[in-house]
Structure formats: C-alpha cells, structure tokens
Amino acid sequence: MTFCLNTKIINPEKDIPINNAVILLHGYGGDGNDISTITLNWQRFLPNSIFLCPDGYQKCEINPNGFQWFDLTNDSQEYILEQSIKAEKKVNQFIEEVKIEYKLKNDQICICGFSQGCMLSINLGLTNDESYSSVVGFSGKIINKNNLLKRMKSKTKMLLLHGDQDEVVNPTNLLEAKDFLARNNVPVETNIIKNCGHHISIEASSLALNFIKKNLKI
C-alpha cells in the first residue's frame, strides 16, 4: 500500500511478525527521517513493532526543506485550531491505512510526537472512538482545551515529557496539560527533564520506551 503521507518505515528484523506499530510525528520544520533516529535505541526492545515516521503533509512555511502539520505563521488561535483539525484528519486517514496494511487495532498502536507532533498526538489519542495503546508527547501542549473537551471520545494513557529549559514551548504547558487530563480522568504520567531544552534527551527517550513497553503487548 502507498500511504497518504510520505513515510520513513523501520521494519522488524527479518521473519519477526508485526504485532504493534509505533507512529512518530515530527516537530515544526522537521521530517520523518529526523524523528526516526529515536527508534535506533527502541527497536531491540520492541522487536515485533514497526515504526512509521511520516512527513507532515505541508511544506514548512519558514523551512522549505522541512514539513509542518499546521501553519504557525498566523498567530490567530482560531486559525491554528482550524489548521490543526485539518492535520488531525490527515493523520487519522494515515492511521487507518496503517491499521489495514498491518492488520492492527488501536490497542496495538502507540502514537508519539515531538513539539507540534506532540500537540497532534494528544488530540488524536482523545478524539478517536477507541483508545490507542498509549500516547507519548515530547515538548508540546494542548492546542485548545475547550475544543478538545467538546470532542473527547476516548481516554488513551499518556506520558508527557518536557525539558525544564525549553525555550520554544514553555514547560508550564506540561503542567497545564497534566491538570486538564487529570480533571477529565485521562490516565497521565509526566516528567520534567532537568537541564534539557527543546529536544528529546536520552533520559526522555528511555522513559518513553519504558512507558511504551508497559502498554504494548510485546
């Protein structure tokens, strides 16, 4: 199958059946190849998982060599929400294609995202009819709490990680997301990584891997 999004795919080693999928959504201006590097440390611990790292469906407005899930050149919150929901629909289409191609159900899929990809991952994990295995979000936030509350249908287990020195997305967003999720009975774990900026540290990668392993049937 040709997916609706250009995708970097890391398959299990030869002859190992695919029982799970980990979908990784990159940040603003990045691409699937960028975020795929995290799988180098994860693959041997998740041997029957396929890793799928799609490119955003739009060229990035400020970095033409990269991609975006939604435009950030307009500061209007209404505009950002509208564009993010369009991106959700595109990623939902992609996930449905993945489920068909590899004969998987939601509880066999983990969605991970960094920064803008994290923002999408949170929404995807709460607006589908069925919960996913888990969502892992690095350095992101909830785009619009009121809108998300209205659309919430499921309660996927979440792990949110954020560097305390993040200069792009303020780490207070993690605390706000944690409060929102807890008040709405969504299982959530959080960790603020010390001396870490806007990137995925080794510590964050390790915490994420353990959370994913705990929630997938390996």
Image (cartoon, grey):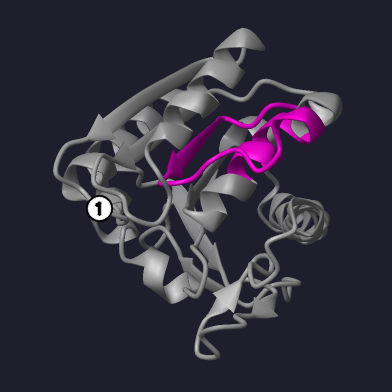
Other-residue count near label 1 (Cα within 10 Å), few / some / many at <14 / 14–19 / ≥20:
some
Tell me where the magenta segment starts and ends, as one range. Answer: 121-147
Residue 144 inside the magenta-drawn segment: yes
> Which residue is at the front of the view, 160 or 10?
160
Residue at left offset 67%, top offset 12%: 184
Q: Is residue 216 left or right of residue 59?
A: left
Q: Residue furthest bottom?
A: 64
* Residue at image point 63% right, 77% down: 6
Residue 129 visible in this rendered orientation of the protein:
no
- Amino acid type of disc 1? Gly
Q: Is residue 20 visible to us here?
A: yes
Q: Secondary structure at mark 1?
A: loop
**Residue 93 falls in which quadrant of the image?**
bottom right
Q: Which residue is mark 1?
A: 197
- Camera-side residue of 112 and 105: 112
Which quadrant does the N terminus fall into?
A: bottom right
In which image quadrant can residue 64 be found? bottom right
The residue sitting at the left extreme is 195
Q: Residue at x 37, y 25 (%)?
A: 190
- Residue 3 position, x and y percent, is 72, 71
94 magenta-colored:
no
- As drawn, is 134 to the left or to the right of 203? right
Q: Position of residue 117 (x, y in %)?
A: 55, 55
